[in-house]
Image (cartoon, helix red, strand yellow):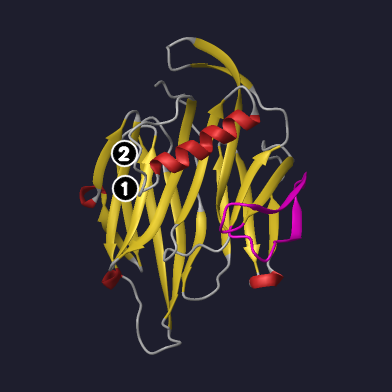
Amino acid sequence: MQLLRETLPVALFSVFAAGCPSSSSTEIHLSDSLLRVSFKGLEKNRTLDLESPPGSAIPEAVKIRFTDAAGQMTGSWAGFLPAGDLPVPMDAVRWHLTSTAPPPIGAGLNDSGVIVRRPLWYFAGGPVEPDPLGGTTRYVAGFRARSEAHAESLLQELLEKTSPGGTTTTLPEGIYRIHQLLHTHIDGNEVVLTFTGSTPFEELEFDLNGTENRHNLDDAELSQQGAVHRATLRIPLLDFNHGGAGGTTHLNHYVIRMNNAGQAPVRTTGRWEFTAL
C-alpha cells in the first residue's frame, strides 16, 4: 500500500478528565493555518467555538457533527468561521469535523501502484469530554477518495482496524496519510497511549507534571502492521497525581512530542483532572 507523502504540521491540545466533568480545547495546525475547536461549560450547558486567525488558508466553510456513545449522530452544524457559542447536544460524546469547500484534486499511487487523480478529503475528530477510563480516540488524517462518503468509510475502517483491541490483521486499501491517531485507555493500573502513524516513529517523548522526558521512545512497544506503524506507551497510574479522600481533585499536566519519518513534528499538551470517588 502506497501512502501519500504530505506534510501537515499538527498540534492538538486537549483536556483529560476521570471521575468528573471537564472542558476541552483542540488546536490543529496545518502549514500556515490554524483551526481552534473549543468546548466550554458542563453537561447541558456546553457550547462549541470554532475559529481561525485572520489570513488563515483554512476554508471558512466547515461542518461538524456530534455522535453519542452508540455512534449515532445526535446533532450537527454547518457554516462559516468564526462561529461561537454553538450548543453541544447533551448526549454528545464525540465530534467530527471536515470542510465543506471543494476538496483539492491531486495525484497519488493506488494499491496497485497506478497513479490516479482524486480529491483530498481531510478529517479531524475526538472526544468532547475525554475520559481515559472509558477510552478515547483523536485523529487527524487525509484521504484521496472518489467521494466524501468513500473517504469517510476509509476513516471508519482505519479507526476500527488500528484500535488497541482490534483483531483484524489487514488494513483498509486506499491512499491516505495519518497525521495523528491516538488511542487512550486505562488498563488495570496503567494509562495506555497508543500512537499510530503512516511512517516509522523517530521521536516520542512524554513529559509529566514538569518532569521532562518522563517516558520516551525507548520505553514504547513498537510494531508494524502493513505500512502502518504503532507505538504504545504504558504509564503507571502511580506516576500521576491521584487518589486521596473522596472528592479530592488532582491536576496532571503533560506534554507529548512525537515525530514520524518524513513528517513535521507534532506537539500535544493538556491535562488530566482526577477526582477521587
The circle drawn on residue 73 is none
Q: Residue at x 36, y 31 (%)?
A: 170
Q: Residues within 10 Å of mark 2 (few under 14, many from 20)?
A: many
Q: Find residue 60 and report its horizontal and vertical position in percent.
A: 74, 40
Quadrant location of residue 102?
top right
Tell me the kind of residue under disc 2: Phe
Q: Find residue 275 and report its horizontal and vertical position in percent.
A: 44, 80
Q: Residue at x 32, y 29 (%)?
A: 226
Which residues, given as a range, are shown in magenta? 68-93
Examine the structure image and report whether residue 54 is included in the region drawn in magenta.
no
Q: Secondary structure at mark 1?
A: strand
State if disc 2 and disc 1 touch (CB < 8 Å): yes
**In this rendering, does residue 52 appear at all?**
no
Tell me the kind of residue under disc 1: Leu
Quadrant location of residue 153?
top right
Q: Find residue 243 and report its horizontal and vertical position in percent.
A: 35, 81
Q: Residue at x 63, y 62 (%)?
A: 39
Q: Residue at x 47, y 16 (%)?
A: 110
Q: Find residue 123 and report its horizontal and vertical position in percent.
A: 58, 39
